[in-house]
Amino acid sequence: MKVSVLVPVHNAEAFLGECLESILAQDFEDMEILVADDASTDASVALVKQYAARDSRIRWWKNPQNLGLPGNHNACLRQARGEYVKFIHADDKLLSTSAIREMTAALDHNPSVVLAGCRQHLTGAKSRPTIFSQNSGVYDGRRIIVASFEQNTNLIGQPTLTLFRRNAAKRGFDERFIGHLDFEMWCHLLEQGDFYFLAEVLATWRIHESQQTARPVTNGFSRDEQLLFVRTYFAKPWLKDAATQRMLFAQIYYLEKKYGSQADPLTSAMMAQMSPRSFAWQWLKHKGSQPFQKLLRRCRLPLNQSSGQGQSRVMNPASSSRRLAQDF
């Protein structure tokens, strides 16, 4: 079995049909489709049964009790038998019939790559997605982690946009996280290998009020999650050694802004790796860029996701097939 397509479901009847149709329309056939219903109270299960009757590749089950977002992701992962794993959230969908084939080829042809992803695309949101790069190719995994901390964002995107090696994810998702569930897994994978980026739109993730990550209180999301996440990764010796001045400043700035004195032990450790002159220079660059960024946002063209207008690009073009630190 080459690919396990995993669809975690919870009260997703409104969009589940679109999701499953986009999977069944793929031109790649060597895959299993696992659907895990997390104790839905709507018509999700009835819908899954209809699709399972149509295609024998669909295997589904209903959890005896609600496992929550992280628990259901791990339930899916434990049942996967494929060499590669492709999560597709039940409210998202694939936009290209070749999505799984193209991502699979990226891993097949690049042994160093543990995670593949495509250009971000949003449905149901006015915000502009982050454009990782205009160039397809292999990017250094650990450097992407550092760059993500520098920009205080998840540069990879959501699970529906990715495919990864199952053997590299044996640990499973860290269930301490909800809002950072996917990004923490990407960091775990990218510590082990490289990232392949496909600079084309292959899938979309949907923004809507009823999605699980939009209900932080009922899903157990903690306000302190970001602090825990940064603390967890900054404790890793390799990241301390690789931390740039830009990364250190960004994390000190945003952690102090959000958590105040609660973040003092962590930000003090980061400050110890910065000189006063370096911190002052990073602060001046940050403040000096804000008026320019606001002006860009005001002057930006209306969003046209298919053409890329109005989207922010965070990676510079590079001539080498393998992008290293200087390309971020």
Image: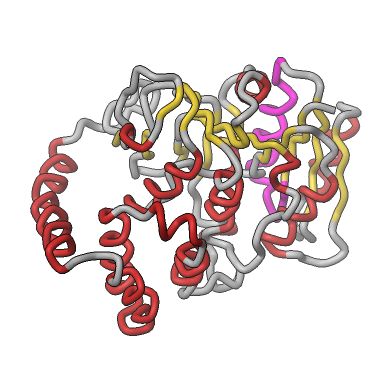
Q: Residue at x 83, y 32 (%)?
A: 32
Q: Residue at x 48, y 47 (%)?
A: 207
Q: Is residue 46 left or right of residue 12?
A: right
Q: Quadrant of the C terminus?
A: top left
Number of marks in the rendered image: 0
| Magenta region | 8-27
Question: Which residue is situated farthest in the bottom direction here?
Answer: 261
Q: Is residue 84 left or right of residue 306?
A: right
- The spot of residue 28 in percent (x, y) is 73, 18
Q: Is residue 75 magenta?
A: no
The reply to whether residue 281 is in sight is: yes
Q: Residue at x 70, y 47 (%)?
A: 169
- The spot of residue 211 in percent (x, y) is 57, 54
Q: Is residue 71 left or right of residue 124?
A: right
Q: How is the image coloured?
A: secondary structure
In-front residue for pair 14/299:
299
Q: What secondary structure do most residues of the magenta stretch adopt?
A: helix
- The spot of residue 105 in percent (x, y) is 65, 19
Q: Quadrant of the N terminus?
A: top right
- The spot of residue 127 in percent (x, y) is 34, 44
The reply to whether residue 200 is in sight is: no
Q: Is residue 245 left or right of residue 293?
A: right
Q: Image quadrant of residue 83?
A: top right
Q: Image quadrant of residue 120?
A: top left
- With respect to residue 224, does 119 lie above or below? above
Q: Residue at x 85, y 38 (%)?
A: 81
